[in-house]
Image: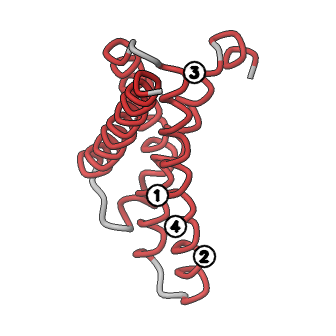
Amino acid sequence: MALRRTLGFGFEIAVLVSAEIVAVPYYAAVRRANSLPALQQICDRILEDEAFHLQFQAANLSLVVRNRFGLRHALHRALQAAICLVVWNQHGRVLAAGGYTYKAFWDECDHLLAEVQERSQRAARSRCADSFAA
């Protein structure tokens, strides 16, 4: 927690985004790995919430990152890679039971991160264009 505060709000958002990204394949795996309708409904709801959270956090990232997208995106991708390794080591059995290999898990997380980063850039460009139009 202290490290997050020391590195700033942008880092805090990056950590949250990474946690929400790994939640998507995790809860998709939990959903696929069981046949309990109640648990499947809970997973569906969590996945819907995570989709909204990722959109919201992309907007937050656009406020923090400004024009330094290249370096920030590379650092965020490195953070995401480390988190994926930890999650796979701790929860790989659940992910595998839901049909994921490590590569499939990483690919999905990487794809989601790329989407968040692209949305963040679009939002920042849009705000910049709006400020010039005003």
Task: Kindly identify which residue carries mark 3.
Answer: 11
Q: In the image, 32: left or right of 47? A: left
What's the distance in space between the residues labelled 2 and 3, CA to CA? 29 Å
At numbered mark 2, what does the secondary structure look like: helix, strand or loop?
Answer: helix
What's the distance in space between the residues labelled 3 and 1, CA to CA? 23 Å
In the image, residue 98 lies at what x, y percent? 37, 68
What's the distance in space between the residues labelled 2 and 1, CA to CA? 13 Å
At label 3, counting other C-alpha atoms closer than 10 Å, the crowd grade (few under 14, some 14-19, many 20 or more) is many
Task: Kindly identify which residue carries mark 2.
Answer: 42
Task: Kindly identify which residue carries mark 1.
Answer: 26
Q: Residue at x 41, y 17 (%)?
A: 72
Badge nearest the viewer, 2 or 4: 4
What's the distance in space between the residues labelled 4 and 1, CA to CA? 13 Å
Badge nearest the viewer, 4 or 1: 4
Task: Kindly identify which residue carries mark 4.
Answer: 48
At label 1, counting other C-alpha atoms closer than 10 Å, the crowd grade (few under 14, some 14-19, many 20 or more) is many
What amino acid is labelled 2 in the image?
Ile
